[in-house]
Image (spheres, rainbow, N blue to C red):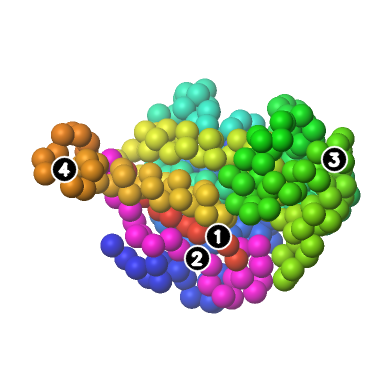
Amino acid sequence: MPTTNALRLSTSQVEPMVAAPHQPVLYHEIIHALQPNSPGFYVDGTVGAGGHARGILEACAPDGCLLGLDLDPQALALAREFLAPYGERVRLVQASYTSLHEVLRGEGWERVQGILLDLGLSSMQMDNPERGFSFQVDAPLDMRFDPSRGLTAADLVNSLPETELVDLLFRYGEEPRSRRIVQAIIQARPVTTTGQLAEIVARAYPKRGRTHPATRTFQALRIAVNQELEALEQILPKAMDALSAGGRLAIISFHSLEDRIVKEYFRRESRDCICPPRQPVCTCGHKATLKEVVRKPITPAEAEIQVNPRARSAKLRIAEKL
Ligand SMILES: C[S@@+](CC[C@H](N)C(=O)[O-])C[C@H]1O[C@@H](n2cnc3c(N)ncnc32)[C@H](O)[C@@H]1O
């Protein structure tokens, strides 16, 4: 199995080929991991503005095809424009990647040779004040990837009982002061804007160091609003099922909660037996379904982080279907 560094590319290779609306993270590493070729079928389950998708389409030319999914109609509009030169080779669908099987069936595709998930939110979403993801600008407290359905962050903040809100901030934000923050939120209800929430948290939790005190609270709410960890848990077996033998799943995560889910799934599914370690005889009958392409996650080179500081926490794991 190659080491992490064997797959991490040199500093001269970190620049994506063209300026994309969102700077794709670990761009060359993704192409290297998926090894797209013609005439393969590839899925980008979080297509965003299409930066990685474009690289995959270039690599699987002339006949390879890509299916791009995203929950966000604004992201899909950008991807549609950015990927227009690839014509019939690209299909874009507004859907959660958890609906992968249904979407593949709808497109008449069976097995695919590569799947990418670049988790979390894009720079466009973060920087668009109307979406309510950022504490840097005042906006309605929304945070939905698909703004047409589901509860907003304001709905959660204003309606959840105290204990559930404390649990949410602690579990999804790993926020050590969740109790104190939630007490301040409850006193201030209704909380309707990002600015109001950021101020409440800052007052309950004076700033120390360089990180804004509301960072963890905002992360926790975004994960809860979009049910991100549940979606990730659901997609892993579905993605492996959709791959043909030798096909690859590449996942970029941006925080430890996501990475842990991917790591544990890959570890478990790469083993022939998952009985407890002290059990002398195997009774589980489990068979490995994948092999990990790299044991340690691939992280961006320092040169990429300098160009794109948001890449700093990215971790790429790759699995190959047996
Ligand atoms: C980090 S961005 C992807 C950027 C993309 N790789 C590019 O090069 O432009 C993540 C995208 O995933 C989308 N997303 C998040 N959860 C999703 C889900 N369950 N199903 C589909 N898309 C999702 C977000 O709306 C966002 O556009």
Look at the picture and state if 174 lies above or below 225.
Answer: below
Residue 279 tag number: 4
Q: Are marks 3 and 2 in contact (CB under 8 Å)?
A: no
Three-letter amino acid code of the residue under disc 1? Ala
- Kindly identify which residue carries mark 2: 299
From mark 1 to mark 2, how far is it between C-alphas?
6 Å
Q: Secondary structure at mark 3?
A: helix
Label 3 neighbourhood size at 10 Å, few (<14), some (14-19), many (20+)? few
Q: Nearer the viewer, residue 82 or 76?
A: 76
Where is residue 315? Give x, y as percent.
Answer: 50, 59
Question: Range of the magenta residues?
Answer: 288-311
- Kindly identify which residue carries mark 1: 314
**Pair 4/1: label in front:** 4
From mark 4 to mark 1, how far is it between C-alphas?
37 Å
Where is residue 237? Give x, y as percent.
Answer: 40, 35
Q: Are marks 4 and 3 in contact (CB under 8 Å)?
A: no
**Pair 4/3: label in front:** 3
- Kindly identify which residue carries mark 3: 187
